[in-house]
Image: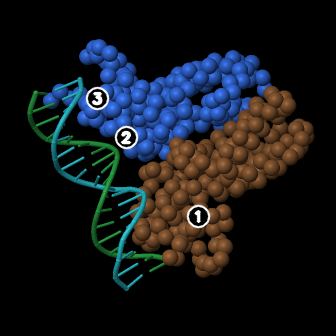
Chain colours: A brown, B blue, C cyan, D green
Amino acid sequence: MPAPHPTAVEADPTGPGGVEPLGTRERILDIALELFTTQGYDKTSLRQIAEQLGYSKAAIYYHFASKEDILMALHLRLHDFGREALSSISESEASPELWALLLDRLIDQMLQHRALFILHERNQAAIEELHRERHDADHEDLQMRFRQALSNPEIALEFRVRLSCAFGAVMGGLILAGDVFAEVPSD
Amino acid sequence: MPAPHPTAVEADPTGPGGVEPLGTRERILDIALELFTTQGYDKTSLRQIAEQLGYSKAAIYYHFASKEDILMALHLRLHDFGREALSSISESEASPELWALLLDRLIDQMLQHRALFILHERNQAAIEELHRERHDADHEDLQMRFRQALSNPEIALEFRVRLSCAFGAVMGGLILAGDVFAEVPSD
DNA sequence: GTCTATATAGGGATAGAC
DNA sequence: GTCTATCCCTATATAGAC
């Protein structure tokens, strides 16, 4: 048994042991990301992905156990990013002076991961289903810590509202895409 | 030819000519709204809707020409709401004093149409496809005026950012659902 | 207006050759 | 690692009886 996709999803796709020359798995993920964001997850068939990949459907199943696994792998990318971002936030005290810098840095990173955010923004339904089925302990943590941060009673309500606004604004900006007002959070 | 769904989609569903006793069409829309928001548009089959409706699949096709038409009808509800909201905004001058009141009123309305917003938030992909196919002149207008309002150079940049924040915050609040901080836009 | 039955198509997924 | 061929299932949509 070659056992191609061991636990189906791995954190680092560049290959832990076997050194893949060009990374077919990566290409699949990139194509999927593109298609999922433009057409939506459900409307995108494996056939389409395979087509654009140059290979056939079955080839994909060597690298991923299912269509959902592809989405999951994409989701994990954002996941890792989120965890990293959170640690920087929750470690620091709630001093307003720091927040400006923190938010600024965070927003920069978000812009780089743009495509991932849009994917999640546009396919919430599909992604929520992932969580209903594969009950990641990982993810529960992350989600909870996020909400805690947003509703921590020790932090003044104003700050929480402000943070929500910032996130909302950035997301909105990402979606509307065109006008990137350089965003130094003055308020 | 009975020609049940004439132009397939109508603004007022209570029936322009024929007086429907209890409004089967309405019930379909309500059930669909519920299912689409909870499971997602693509994951929801007409069979499910019919089941919950008490009738069979084919019955639905009497009232709607296709599954997309149901989504479209739901979309139009929000559409009408949006147009109304916009007119109140764009008519008024950009004086900051007015905005507080305007936003306040707007947010109230948004909360009432909550389900509709969530539907759109969670099924953006599906809804965008509607627009690619049926190129509503109507909708182009609306969308454009919205962006104009958000990027009108006559209005100070700060205000625009602020408005984006407000929308983002409200949307975020709607999704996270639980904590409804009563939102008088102080900033 | 609503039903049953059916046509048609396309999806995800598997088996096994190469 | 990739391909061909195929299975099975569910979906939308239609036709025509009641």
The answer to whether residue B42 of the structure is visible from this angle is yes
In which quadrant will I find the N terminus of chain B? Answer: top left
Within 10 Å of the Cα at label 2, are there few (<14), some (14-19), or many (20+) other Cα atoms? some
Closest to the camera, between mark 3 and mark 1, is: 1
Residue A152 quadrant: top right
Question: Which residue corresponds to mark 2?
Answer: B45
Please count the marks in the image.
3
Answer with left or right where residue A70 lies relative to residue A116: left
Q: Which residue was labeled with disc 1?
A: A7
**Residue tagged by mark 3?**
B55
Q: Residues under labels 3 and 2: Cα distance?
A: 14 Å
Rendering quarter of residue B165? top right
State the image coordinates of residue B18 (x, y, percent, origin top left). Answer: 26, 16
Give the amino acid type for the residue marked by disc 1 in the picture.
Thr
Q: Chain of mark 3?
A: B
Q: Position of residue B159 (x, y in %)?
A: 73, 31
Q: Amino acid at mark 2?
A: Ser
Q: Is residue A18 above or below residue A180?
A: below
